[in-house]
Image (spheres, rainbow, N blue to C red):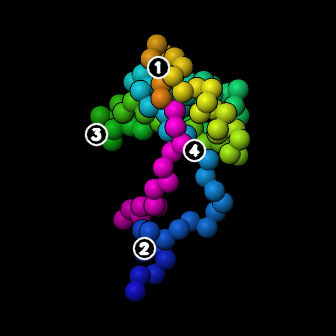
Amino acid sequence: MAAPWWDSDWKDRSGPEYRCFVGNLPYGTSESSLKDAFSSYGPLYSEIAVDPETGRSRGFGFVQFDDQKSMDNAIQGMNGQQVGGRNITVSQANHRPRRWRA
């Protein structure tokens, strides 16, 4: 039997998460410029996926919102729009189980 603090599939007991996946980002995009691109939809924060070996952006990121309506509006308004000269794709992020690191 696994204890909750050891089990990677243990559900976080916080509320629902309203995150968008943002793909096809230019490699020079920073977290602040990504958040600025979504500023009219009220993002809480943004993050860019970075390759741990090179420190270079992997070309995608995530934007967190406060509620479902803001997230839905951002998906509808930003999907296919240009950011840094590239057409981005925006969709609801899949929830992944928490992964514990030793």
Q: Are marks 4 and 1 in contact (CB under 8 Å)?
A: no
Say which element carries label 1: strand
Tell me the SS state at disc 3: loop
* First-in-chain label (2 vs 1): 2
Question: In the rendered view of the protein, which quadrant contains the N terminus?
Answer: bottom left
- Is residue 28 at least partly visible in the picture? no
Residue drawn at x 44%, y 17% as measured from the top left = 86
Res 64 quadrant in image: top right
| Structural distance between the alpha carbons of marks 2 and 1 | 39 Å
Which of the numbered marks, if any, corresponds to residue 87? Answer: 1
Q: Quick one: label 2 or label 3, which is nearer the N terminus?
A: 2
Per the rendering, the mark at residue 7 is: 2
Task: Check disc 3 and give the amino acid type.
Answer: Glu
- Image position of 86 with respect to 40: above or below: above
User: Which residue is most to the left?
Assistant: 53
Three-letter residue code for mark 1: Asn
Left or right, 27 with reference to 65? left
Residue 19 circle label: 4
Q: Are marks 1 and 3 in contact (CB under 8 Å)?
A: no
